[in-house]
Image (spheres, rainbow, N blue to C red):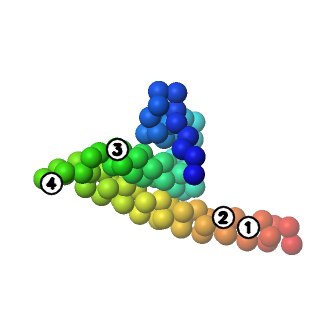
């Protein structure tokens, strides 16, 4: 797998740039957008955790991993809501067409 690296050479910066772009252009009330934001947040935390050299007594990496896990959980919840809303919209569109 080839890693994509941002202009300054940091994979975390690439994820940060994508997250910033999404946050400045998207409507977070949409559960699909919220899921996208949560996945990018998780990716950022995982990328940062990967850059931390593990050492005894160091809690930075553990904290980043916990934050990533929280973001993944939020993404799952938001995606579930997006699925339900999409199904509801499809049913309503079918009822309107019929």
58 vs 53, left or right, is left
The quadrant where residue 70 appears: bottom left
Q: Residue at x 54, y 67 (%)?
A: 80
* Label drawn at residue 86: 2
Residue 50 x %, y %: 36, 49
Instruction: Say which residue label 4 marks.
Output: 56
- The tally of labels here is 4
**What is the spatial separation of the Cα atoms under label 1 and label 3, in whole angstroms?**
43 Å
* Label drawn at residue 51: 3
Is residue 72 in view? yes
Q: Residues within 10 Å of mark 4 (few under 14, many from 20)?
A: few
Residue 36 x %, y %: 53, 51
Q: Residue at x 86, y 72 (%)?
A: 98
Residue lying farthest to the front in this orientation: 1
**What is the spatial separation of the Cα atoms under label 3 and label 2, in whole angstroms?**
38 Å
Do residues under tags 2 and 1 come within 8 Å of each other at their CB atoms?
yes
Do residues under tags 4 and 2 come within 8 Å of each other at their CB atoms?
no
**What is the spatial separation of the Cα atoms under label 1 and label 4, in whole angstroms?**
53 Å
């Amino acid at each position: 797998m080839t890693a994509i690296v941002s202009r300054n050479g940091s994979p975390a910066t690439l994820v940060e740039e994508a997250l910033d772009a999404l946050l400045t252009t998207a409507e977070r009330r949409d559960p699909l957008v919220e899921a996208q934001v949560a996945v990018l947040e998780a990716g950022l935390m995982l990328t940062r955790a990967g850059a931390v050299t593990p050492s005894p007594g160091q809690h930075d990496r553990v904290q980043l991993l916990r934050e990533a896990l929280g973001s993944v959980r939020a993404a799952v919840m938001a995606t579930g809501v997006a699925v339900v809303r999409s199904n509801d919209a499809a049913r309503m569109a079918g009822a309107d067409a019929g």
